[in-house]
Image: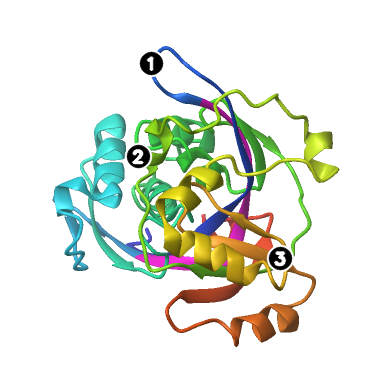
Amino acid sequence: MTETLKLPAPAKLNLFLHITGQRDDGYHELQTVFQFLDYSDQITLTRTNDGRIKRLSEHPLVPEQDDLIIRAAKLLQVYSGTSFGVELSLEKKLPMGGGLGGGSSDAATVLLGCNKLWSLNLSRSILAKIGLQLGADIPVFIHGYSAWAEGVGEQLTPINPPQKWYLIVRPNVSISTVEIFRHKGLTRDCEPLTIADFQAGHGTNVLEPVVRKLSFEVDDAINWLSAYSPVRMTGSGSCIFASFDDKQSAQEVFALLPNIWEGFVAKGVNCSPLVNFV
C-alpha cells in the first residue's frame, strides 16, 4: 500500500464570471468557465497509522487549524471513519488572494490524495460533495476537467475552451473575496448566457470594475497589460491575465513586466495535471 504521494494542486482561471442573482441564504448565483493552468502548488502526503492529521510546512499567515488542507483531511477522515491519518507538506507557488483558486485546489488535492492513501475508493462525485462544504470551487478541482459552471460554481458541464498560453500578472495586493461580493456596486443581475454565447466571445468578469475602483494596483496592472493583449481578471482578483497564441509571445511580454509586480507564463489545459496521479 502506498504510504507517500507527491501531487500537484493546479491553478485555475475564470475565463468569464457573471452573477445572475442572489439566493435567500446570501450566496450568489454564478456563471463562469473554469480552465486549469499547468502551474501548480505541490503537496506531499504521507499516511500515518495513528489517526494524526498534521501540517509539516510552515504557513505563518494561516493557523494550522484554519488551513483548508487540514480541514479537508479532517472532513474526509470523519466522513469515512478511517483510522488512518496524514502528514501534509505544501510547496506554495500560487499566491493567496489572487483569484487562482490556490486554497481550493490544495484542498481538492488533499481529498483526492487521502482517498487514495487511505484506500477509501470514494467516487469523485462524493469527494466533490465533501469538498463543497469547504468551498464552492473545490468540486471543479476534484473532477479535473475544464467546465462551464453555474449555481454557486458547483454545477459543472465539461467544456473545451482553446488551450492558449497565458501571461498571469499579480499586482502587489491581496483582494478580499467577501468584501467584493458584499460591495453595493457589484452587478448581480446579468442576463444568463449559454455556452454558445461564451464560445462566440461574450462574457466579462463583473467583479473587475469593482476591484479596479477599490485597488489602483489592479487598475494600473490592467492598463499596462492591455497594451499587449485583451486582459481579464480571474475570480475576485488580484491576478489578471492575457492570452497569447504561443509561448514565445507570452514570454516576450513577460520580459517587459515592471518589477513592482509578479507574474508567470503558463499553458491553459482542459484536463487537470492531477488526473494523471489520482
Q: Earlier in the sequence, mark 1 or mark 2?
A: 1
Q: Is residue 237 left or right of residue 46?
A: right
Question: What is the secondary structure assignment of the residue under circle 2?
Answer: helix
Using a 10 Å C-alpha cutoff, classify the residue at mark 3 as few (fewer than 14 neighbours), some (14 to 19) or many (20 or more): many
Q: Earlier in the sequence, mark 2 or mark 3?
A: 2
Q: Position of residue 4 (x, y in %)?
A: 34, 65
Mark 2 against mark 3, which lies toward the viewer? 2
Q: Which residues are magenta?
A: 29-43
Mark 1 against mark 2, which lies toward the viewer? 2
Closer to the camera in the image, 231 or 12:
231
For residue 259, above or below residue 158: below
Q: Which quarter of the figure is the N terminus placed in?
A: bottom left
**Could you tell me which residue is drawn at 66 percent across and 47 percent down?**
146
Gap between marks 1 and 2 measured at Cα: 17 Å
Give the amino acid at mark 2.
Answer: Glu
Closer to the camera in the image, 239 or 225:
225
Q: Which residue is mark 1?
A: 25
Q: Are marks 1 and 3 in contact (CB under 8 Å)?
A: no
For residue 77, above or below residue 266: above
Gap between marks 1 and 3 measured at Cα: 36 Å
Q: Which residue is mark 2?
A: 179
Give the amino acid at mark 3.
Answer: Ser
Q: Is residue 39 visible?
A: no
Indicate whether residue 35 is drawn in magenta.
yes
Q: Position of residue 229 (x, y in %)?
A: 73, 68
Give the amino acid at mark 1.
Answer: Asp
**Could you tell me which residue is drawn at 37 percent across and 49 percent down?**
107
